[in-house]
């Protein structure tokens, strides 16, 4: 995939890369379209089991390109997957494959909003995080929904309401980042985590992630009933049968994603 967002599949790991380094990977209409295309491909490609998102140059992404319209809905009207919030490019994605954010530098605004959607966050020791919107006179919307769900309320409000930046170590201390690594080892560490995730049966992993996501808006009883239905569906897959055979034979399973 050419353009300002690159998509590369290596084995079962898809890497999606912001590739507009001269603009610190700021998101204009073209980048926004590229991200939608890349994540649609990741969702639909059967061989892609785990995703890594990263950026080129000094930034992961500094957020909306204020000089280029910020990829606003007037320039890019959105797709089905953007509902119900067309103004935020990834707000409606239903992707239940594991996704790792490998944050290589500045991660601000829209860029941080994407990170709060990812399952795992590995940061370079050069990374910085922030929601600067309030200092520009506009609110952070999807970030304000997600961030308090991930970290302590006071830490979330500090980021959202001051517009200040924090470094990678502070982001780790407050639970926004899972791991801080040397800059030159960032993608190596992200790929190492991806390889660990590939040890799981991919359909079982997707079921677990979907259960975790949907259960947040369900009562306990409804969540359990939904989960038991999902369990029956997953137990009927070829991978479930392979898992049982591999356990009985004392060998590593050969997952097929079917």
Image (cartoon, helix red, strand yellow):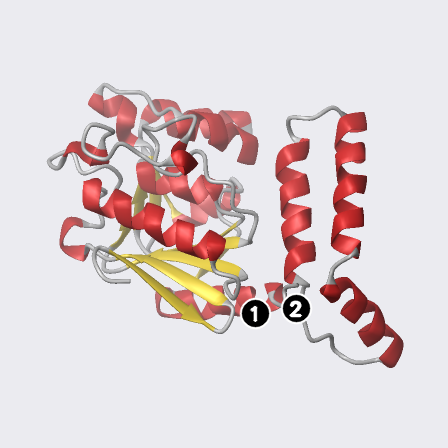
The residue indicated by pointer 1 is 195
Above or below residue 224? Residue 256 is below
Q: Specify the quadrant of the image occupied by residue 71.
A: top left
Which residue is found at the position 65% from the left and 30% from the top? 216
Q: Quadrant of the C terminus?
A: bottom right
Where is residue 57 drawn, in percent x and y? Answer: 23, 60
The answer to whether 30 appears left or right of 156 in the picture is left
Please report contact status of discs 2 and 1: CB closer than 8 Å, yes or no.
yes
17 lies above or below 96? below
Q: Nearer the viewer, residue 215 or 186?
A: 215
Residue 162 appears left or right of 193: left
Q: Which residue is located at x 48 percent, y 68 percent?
A: 191
Q: Residue 48 appears at what percent x and percent y?
A: 50, 63
Whether residue 151 appears in this view of the structure is no
Check disc 2 and report its element: helix, strand or loop: loop
Q: Which of these two is toward me, 25 or 171?
A: 25
Q: Is residue 221 above or below residue 120?
A: above
Q: Residue at 77%, 63% (x, y): give it.
A: 240
Measure how far apart labels 2 and 1 are at the Cα level: 7 Å
| Among the 4 quarters of the image, the one containing residue 165 | top left
Residue that lies at the very extreme toward the left in this rendered image: 67
Residue neighbourhood size for the residue with mark 2, other residues' Cα within 10 Å, grouped as few (<14), some (14–19), many (≥20): few
Q: Is residue 153 left or right of residue 85?
A: right
The residue carrying mark 2 is 199
Residue 257 % position (x, y): 63, 64
Q: Where's residue 22, x and y in %?
A: 13, 54
Which residue occupies the foreground of this view, 81 or 31? 81
């Amino acid at each position: 995939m050419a353009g300002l967002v690159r998509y590369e599949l290596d084995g079962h790991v898809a890497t999606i890369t912001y590739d507009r380094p001269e603009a610190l990977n700021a998101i204009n209409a073209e980048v926004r379209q590229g991200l939608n295309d890349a994540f649609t491909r990741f969702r639909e490609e059967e061989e892609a089991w785990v995703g890594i998102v990263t950026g080129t140059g000094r930034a992961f992404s500094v957020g909306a390109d204020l000089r280029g319209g910020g990829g606003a809905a007037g320039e890019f009207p959105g797709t089905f997957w953007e509902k119900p919030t067309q103004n935020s490019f990834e707000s409606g994605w239903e992707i239940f494959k594991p996704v790792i954010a490998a944050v290589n530098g500045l991660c601000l605004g829209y860029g941080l909003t994407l990170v709060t959607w990812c399952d795992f966050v590995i940061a370079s020791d050069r990374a910085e995080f922030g929601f600067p919107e309030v200092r520009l006179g506009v609110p952070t919307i999807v970030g304000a929904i997600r961030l308090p769900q991930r970290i302590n309320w006071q830490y979330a409000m500090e980021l959202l309401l001051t517009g200040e930046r924090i470094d990678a170590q502070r982001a780790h201390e407050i639970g926004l980042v899972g791991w801080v690594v040397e800059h030159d080892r960032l993608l190596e560490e992200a790929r190492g985590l991806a390889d660990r995730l590939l040890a799981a049966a991919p359909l079982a992993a997707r079921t677990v992630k979907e259960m975790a996501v949907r259960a947040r808006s369900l009562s306990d009883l409804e969540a359990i009933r939904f989960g038991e239905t999902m369990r029956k569906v997953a137990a009927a897959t070829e991978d479930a049968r392979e898992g049982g055979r591999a356990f009985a034979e004392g060998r590593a399973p050969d997952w097929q994603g079917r």
